[in-house]
Image: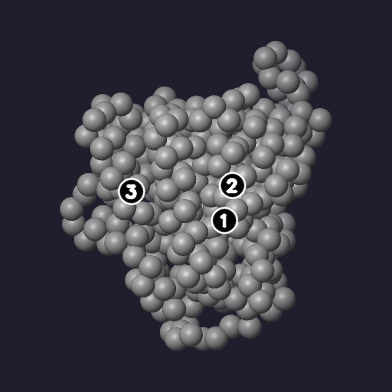
């Protein structure tokens, strides 16, 4: 393969890579024109990327859909393999019927791209979370019939967090299939949206991270990982800041439980950080800077932090080189770019 970066003794596997299809944009445009007031967070995100004019939204739209462009840019940035996922917010804003339709169409279309380039792409399944079974049936179909490697969960589902009973059939399916759930950002839910949007902070600059870090911490303290101890979750952007908070979360959690401050919150058998170092893996999507990467490895363990780009939203070949030169051993670099991803997503690339 042509490669502007020096050849490396490892495959660079990028695990949080946005993908889209024409049907997705058609559904989004119809939703935005039929219900322009319903979901201000979706309007802010996809009003820009699906409807916006100008260099950035137009190039993102093209790159989400166009396979030859994607392959050329993977070659130019030294990416051997991408794990694709339907771009945020996936089917989360849609009613059950539309969500089922779009998930099925998108998974079939992505599977066709993967079938044409099996060494370059794998896929995470889009799931209709608003369906009666929270998407369990479509996840099973995508894994068993299409060969998908996990599911993408774009944070809140119509302002609901996925720690309530409705979503347990989805987690049960993921755990019993043995596939990972990638918890990916969405714009902030309704109750969080305004203070971010007032100052232009609801997007990937900061609002995404707050929304998604909150979602992950809710999953931990609600006991989802006690109910499904084998559940594997992956989170991008170096853990959406939770590694930075780890010790304070444990410290305050212990005191809250001891003093009985929240009688409605059932105590966990373990500290929050233990779940975050057992069930959760972390990726560097959008966060290529060495200080933060090294800090996250220190906090959660080097064997839990792997590479991702966040194509096409942050396509910067120089940021790949930044991670090629992390101050770690060759063995650790192999794990970072290839080894961890191969195990967590059960890839078979050789
Ligand atoms: Mn992303």
**Residue at position x 49%, y 37% from top?**
128
In terms of image quadrants, where is residue 42?
top left
Q: Secondary structure at mark 1?
A: loop
Q: Earlier in the sequence, mark 3 or mark 1?
A: 3
Cα–Cα span, label 3 and label 1: 19 Å
> Mark 3 near ligand 1 (CB under 8 Å)?
no
> Mark 1 near ligand 1 (CB under 8 Å)?
no
Cα–Cα span, label 2 and label 3: 20 Å
| Side (left or right) of 88 relative to 228 | left
| Label ID, residue 93 | none
Q: Nearer the viewer, residue 105 or 219?
A: 105
Q: Specify the quadrant that holds the C terminus.
A: bottom right
* 115 shown above or below 54: below
* 148 shown above or below 307: above
| Label ID, residue 23 | 3
Residue 224 appears anywhere in the view = yes
**Residue at position x 75%, y 32% from top?**
227
Q: Which residue is mark 1?
A: 146
* 325 shown above or below 131: below
Q: Earlier in the sequence, mark 2 or mark 3?
A: 3
Cα–Cα span, label 2 and label 1: 7 Å
Q: Secondary structure at mark 3?
A: helix
**Which of pointers 2 and 3 indicates the residue nearer the eye?**
2
| Side (left or right) of 56 relative to 127 | left
* Residue 331, position as x, y percentages in the image: 72, 76
Q: Secondary structure at mark 2?
A: helix
Q: Which residue is mark 2?
A: 141
* Residue 84, position as x, y percentages in the image: 49, 59
């Amino acid at each position: 393969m042509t490669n502007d970066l020096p050849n490396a003794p490892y495959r660079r596997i990028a695990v949080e890579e946005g993908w889209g299809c024409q049907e997705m944009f058609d559904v989004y445009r119809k939703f935005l024109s039929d219900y322009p007031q319903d979901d201000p967070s979706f309007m802010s995100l996809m009003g820009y990327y699906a409807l916006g004019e100008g260099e950035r939204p137009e190039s993102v739209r093209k790159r989400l859909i166009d396979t030859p462009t994607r392959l050329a840019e993977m070659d130019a940035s030294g990416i051997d393999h991408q794990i694709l996922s339907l771009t945020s917010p996936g089917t989360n804003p849609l009613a059950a019927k539309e969500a089922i339709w779009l998930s099925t169409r998108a998974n079939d279309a992505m599977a066709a791209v993967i079938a044409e380039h099996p060494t370059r792409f794998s896929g995470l399944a889009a799931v209709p979370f608003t369906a009666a079974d929270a998407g369990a049936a479509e996840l099973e179909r995508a894994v068993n019939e299409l060969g998908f490697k996990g599911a993408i969960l774009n944070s809140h589902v119509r302002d609901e967090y996925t720690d309530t009973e409705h979503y347990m059939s989805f987690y049960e399916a993921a755990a019993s299939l043995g596939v990972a759930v990638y918890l990916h950002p969405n714009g902030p839910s309704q109750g969080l949206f305004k203070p971010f949007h007032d100052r232009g902070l609801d997007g990937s600059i900061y609002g995404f991270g707050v929304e998604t870090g909150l979602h992950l911490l809710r999953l931990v303290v609600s006991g989802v990982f006690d109910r499904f101890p084998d559940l594997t979750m992956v989170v991008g952007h170096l853990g959406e800041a939770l590694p930075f908070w780890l010790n304070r979360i444990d410290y305050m959690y212990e005191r809250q439980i001891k003093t009985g401050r929240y009688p409605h919150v059932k105590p966990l058998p373990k500290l929050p950080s233990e779940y975050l170092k057992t069930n959760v893996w972390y990726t560097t999507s959008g966060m290529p800077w060495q200080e933060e990467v090294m800090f996250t490895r220190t906090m959660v363990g080097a064997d839990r932090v792997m590479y991702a780009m966040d194509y096409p939203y942050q396509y910067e070949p120089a940021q790949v080189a930044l991670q090629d030169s992390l101050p770690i051993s060759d063995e650790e670099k192999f794990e970072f770019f290839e080894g961890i991803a191969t195990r967590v997503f059960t890839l078979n690339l050789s």
